[in-house]
Image (tube, grey):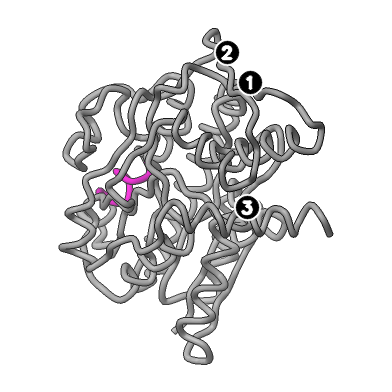
């Protein structure tokens, strides 16, 4: 069996590559491509990567970022994700792999989706404005997988991961998501002996977080099962307010300063928490890593990285 993994140099792709090697060892060939190797926005380049004749394609490549990055790059994020996804799906129609696994995003859900988010609510409204272009692109690609299944018999699978975190995440000021951004802020406050930390928003927004290694387990379950093309939520089913999250990170990192909030900045989506029933039924998947343990491991990895 040959597995083609796009976005192998990214946060999720790095962990997926490692998990696939550990799971299948010498039983398969993993063909991995990062954005440095091929520009998947070009259909010619997308065609080239399929010439390895993969049995399974995992499309993990994407242009992503936090609230600030989404606000600054709405056109780029929408175009890049649409172009890459459309080309990879169209080439799957041409080359006919046994399975195509599309990684969607929780950002595709409407801003005011009833909690917990059910897959049936995906098209019942407009996404949260700060990341709508990215969410709409991913939602459109998930629908494209469904329509290609209907018309061309593409064996496609749509996974909708909630906010992920863990080792190898993007720790930088421009594209970091919530957890790496908070870890960086706390680390800088400790380093500079700052008495307070300023965060965007009110702290009242809630998020659900999935440790990246658990998500890798979900992808492997998708390889080994036949769940169909309907979107499947991948998460823990548990949410936490940003104010509680920063308190937990401060405790784990040993910071006792004040937390202040810039309420002129956006919170993003008010709440995020998934209904994970379909993942249990169709994939047999349940997340195993607690937020406390996952944060400890992520903080340890980050501290090793910055001290090297």
Magenta segment's dominant SS is: helix
Q: What is the C-alpha distance between the residues marked 3 and 2?
A: 25 Å
Tag 2 or tag 1, which sits nearer the N-term? 1
Q: In the rendering, which numbered label is found on residue 299?
A: 3
Q: What's drawn in magenta, residue-wise?
A: 141-147
Most foreground residue, 128 or 299 = 299
Q: Which type of secondary structure does the marked residue at label 2 adopt?
A: strand
C-beta proximity under 8 Å, tags 3 and 1: no
Per the image, the residue denoted by label 1 is 198
C-beta proximity under 8 Å, tags 1 and 2: yes
Q: What is the C-alpha distance between the residues marked 1 and 2?
A: 7 Å
Residue 221, image x, y percentages: 32, 70
Q: Which type of secondary structure does the marked residue at label 3 adopt?
A: helix
Q: Quadrant of residue 65?
A: top right
Residue 203, image x, y percentages: 46, 23
Tally the numbered discs: 3
Quadrant of the frame with the N terminus: bottom left
Q: Taking 64 as reference, is 58 left or right?
A: left
């Amino acid at each position: 069996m040959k597995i083609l993994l796009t976005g192998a140099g990214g946060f999720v792709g790095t962990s997926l590559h490692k998990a696939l090697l550990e799971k299948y060892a010498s039983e398969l060939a993993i063909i991995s491509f990062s954005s440095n190797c091929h520009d998947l926005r070009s259909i010619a380049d997308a065609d080239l990567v399929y010439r390895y004749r993969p049995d399974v394609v995992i499309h993990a490549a994407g242009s992503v970022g936090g609230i600030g990055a989404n606000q600054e790059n709405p056109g780029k994020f929408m175009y890049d994700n649409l172009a890459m996804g459309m080309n990879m799906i169209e080439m799957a129609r041409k080359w006919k792999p046994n399975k195509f696994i599309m990684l969607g995003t929780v950002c595709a859900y409407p801003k005011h989706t009833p909690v917990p988010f059910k897959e049936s609510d995906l098209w019942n409204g407009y996404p949260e404005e700060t990341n709508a272009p990215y969410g709409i692109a991913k939602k459109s690609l998930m629908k494209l997988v469904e329509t290609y299944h209907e018309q061309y018999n593409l064996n496609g699978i749509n996974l909708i991961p909630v906010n992920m975190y863990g080792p190898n995440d993007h720790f930088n000021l421009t594209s970091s998501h919530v957890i790496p951004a908070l870890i960086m802020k706390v680390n800088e406050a400790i380093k500079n002996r700052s008495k307070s930390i300023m965060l965007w928003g009110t702290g009242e927004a809630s998020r659900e977080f999935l440790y990246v290694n658990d998500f890798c387990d979900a992808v492997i379950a998708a390889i080994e099962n036949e769940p169909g093309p309907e979107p499947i939520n991948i998460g823990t089913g548990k949410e936490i307010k940003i104010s509680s999250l920063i308190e937990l990170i401060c405790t784990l990192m040993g910071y006792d300063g004040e937390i202040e909030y810039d309420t002129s900045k956006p919170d993003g989506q008010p709440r995020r928490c998934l209904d994970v029933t379909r993942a249990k039924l169709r994939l047999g998947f349940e997340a195993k890593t607690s937020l406390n343990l996952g944060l400890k491991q992520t903080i340890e990895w980050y501290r090793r990285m910055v001290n090297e």
